Image (tube, grey):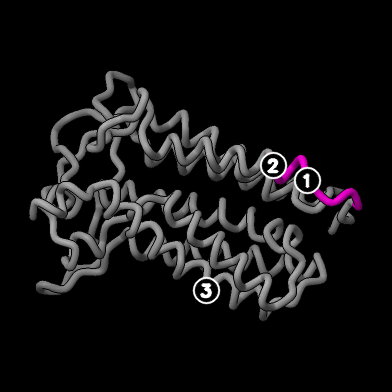
Amino acid sequence: MFPRLISIGSFFLPTYGVLVALGFLLGLYITVRLARRAGLKPDLMVNLAIYSALAGLLGAKIAMLLFDFRDYWTGERRVFSIETLQAAGVYQGGLILAILVAAWYIRSQKLPWLATFDVFAPGIAAGHAIGRLGCFAAGCCWGIRAHVPWAVTFHNPQAYDLTGVPLGIPLHPTQLYESLSEAILFGILLWRIRRPHQQGTIIGLYLILYSISRFAIEFYRFHEQATQLGLSLTQWMAIGLALLGVWILLNRKAKPAPARA
C-alpha cells in the first residue's frame, strides 16, 4: 500500500514505524489520564509504559524468530538485517514479555497489581488499533486469498520487498479486521472503566475479548508456520491469554473500584 512515508535517496521513513510510535503515544496519553483518575502516580505509569513497550518490541521479535526458526537456521532470512528489524513480529510474544516486565516493575514499586493493569488495558487496545494500520500500510500480516467485495490487492513492489506480501492477488485485509476489533475493544473498555468495577475487571476483559477476536481473525491470515492440531501457534497463545483473563476475573478483588468521570 504505502510502506514508505518519506523517501530521500536510500533513506526512508517507514509508515509502519510512524504509526506504531503514534499508537504508543496515544496509548500512553490514555493510560496517564486513567491513572490520575484512579489515584496512581502518572510518572510511575510513564516509566512502566516505556519499560513495557521496549519489552513488547523485544518479545514480538523473539516470538517471530522462534516461529520462523527454520528460515533463519537455513539462511533464507537473516537475524541481523533491515527486514528483520522492520518486521512487526508476533504481538502475543510482545504482550507476554511486556506483562512479565510490567509485573516486575509493579512489584518493585509496590503498585497495586490489578488496578495498574486495569488503567493500561484501554490504552493498549487504542495503540494496537493504530499500529495495525501501520501493518496495513507496510503490507505485513496479510490475509489469505479472498473473494469478498472488501478484499484488498497489493501492487507496490516496495511492500513486497519489505514484507513479502503477494502482489496482484485479492487478500483478506486482516490488518484492518484487527484494527477495527481493537478500536471496538477500546470503546468497550473505556466505557467499562468509567463505571464502578472490581479491580482486575478491565484487564481480564481485555485479555478475553482480544484473544477471542484474534483467534477468529487468524483463520483468515496467511501462515508460513505449520498448524498444531488444526490451530496456529498464535491461536494457541490466544487460548492461553484468554484463560489468564478468565482466571483474573474469577480472582478479582471483592471491593469495587469507584467510577471516575
Compared with 19, 160 (above or below) is: above
Compared with 91, 151 (above or below) is: above
For the C terminus, the image quarter is bottom right
Res 45 seen here: yes
Residue at 55% of width from left, 43% of height from top? 241
Q: What is the crowding at mark 3: few (fewer than 14 residues within 10 Å), some, or many (at least 20)?
A: some
Element type at mark 1: loop
Q: What is the crowding at mark 1: few (fewer than 14 residues within 10 Å), some, or many (at least 20)?
A: few
Residue 10 percent location from the top left of the image: 10, 72
Q: What is the crowding at mark 2: few (fewer than 14 residues within 10 Å), some, or many (at least 20)?
A: few
Residue at 27% of width from left, 55% of height from top? 65
Residue at which label 2 appears: 247
- Span of residues in magenta: 247-255
Q: Is 117 displayed left or right of 17 in the figure?
A: right
Type of amino acid at the residue the image marks with label 3 = Ile
Question: Quick check: marks 2 and 3 in contact, CB under 8 Å?
Answer: no
Q: Does the magenta stretch include residue 168?
A: no
Residue at 15% of width from left, 41% of height from top? 155
Residue at which label 1 appears: 251
Compared with 170, 87 (above or below) is: below
The quadrant in which residue 81 appears is bottom left
Element type at mark 3: helix
Residue at which label 3 appears: 50
